[in-house]
């Protein structure tokens, strides 16, 4: 669905909810719902919503990583692998 063709008033949503949900599910899109001529809500199929959430999570990880680099909280690749190997050895030596 193109955003320009997926803006519907709330009255249309109320009258055609089942069809809109089916269309969203089949075409994986987003619907902007208006009330009194103003955009008030967004309706998405679950796949699109999950993709958006995953992308936001990745952006957050990238932002945190950039902040750590700016703060100097980084390790060389060799130091990172050595630290991981040490942690793995410690886990293997723990009693079950």
Image: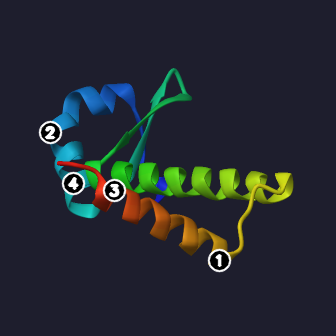
Instruction: Look at the numbered discs 3 and 4 and tell me whether their residues touch, using CB distance below 8 Å.
Output: no
The answer, for residue 26, to whether it is visible in the render is: yes
Q: Estimate the x, y position of residue 49 in percent, counting from the top left.
A: 37, 48
- Name the residue tied to disc 3: 91
- Front residue of 22/71: it is 71
Q: Which residue position holds label 2?
A: 18
Q: Is residue 63 left or right of residue 19?
A: right
Task: Tell me the SS state at disc 1.
Answer: helix
What separation in Å lies between label 2 and label 4 (alpha carbons)? 11 Å
Q: Is the image coloured rainbow, by chain, by secondary structure, or in one colour?
A: rainbow
**Disc 3 or disc 4, which is closer to the eye?**
3
Q: Is residue 82 above or below residue 21?
A: below
| The N terminus sits in image quarter | bottom left
Q: Position of residue 48 (x, y in %)?
A: 35, 55
Q: Which residue, given by chain and number where applicable, does mark 4 sit on? A: 25
Element under disc 4: helix
Marks 1, 3: nearer the viewer: 3
Of tags 2 and 3, the one toward the viewer is 3
Of residues 28 and 87, which is closer to you in this image?
87
N-terminal label among 1 and 3: 1
Residue plotted at (37% across, 27% down):
10
Q: How many marks?
A: 4
């Amino acid at each position: 669905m193109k955003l320009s063709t997926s803006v519907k008033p709330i009255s249309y949503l109320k009258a055609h909810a089942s069809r809109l949900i089916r269309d969203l599910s089949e075409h994986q899109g987003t619907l902007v719902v208006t009330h009194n001529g103003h955009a008030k809500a967004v309706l998405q199929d679950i796949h699109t919503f999950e993709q958006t959430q995953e992308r936001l999570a990745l952006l957050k990880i990238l932002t945190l990583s950039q902040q750590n680099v700016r703060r100097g909280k980084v390790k060389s690749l060799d130091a990172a692998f050595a630290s991981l190997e040490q942690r793995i050895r410690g886990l293997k030596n723990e009693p079950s």
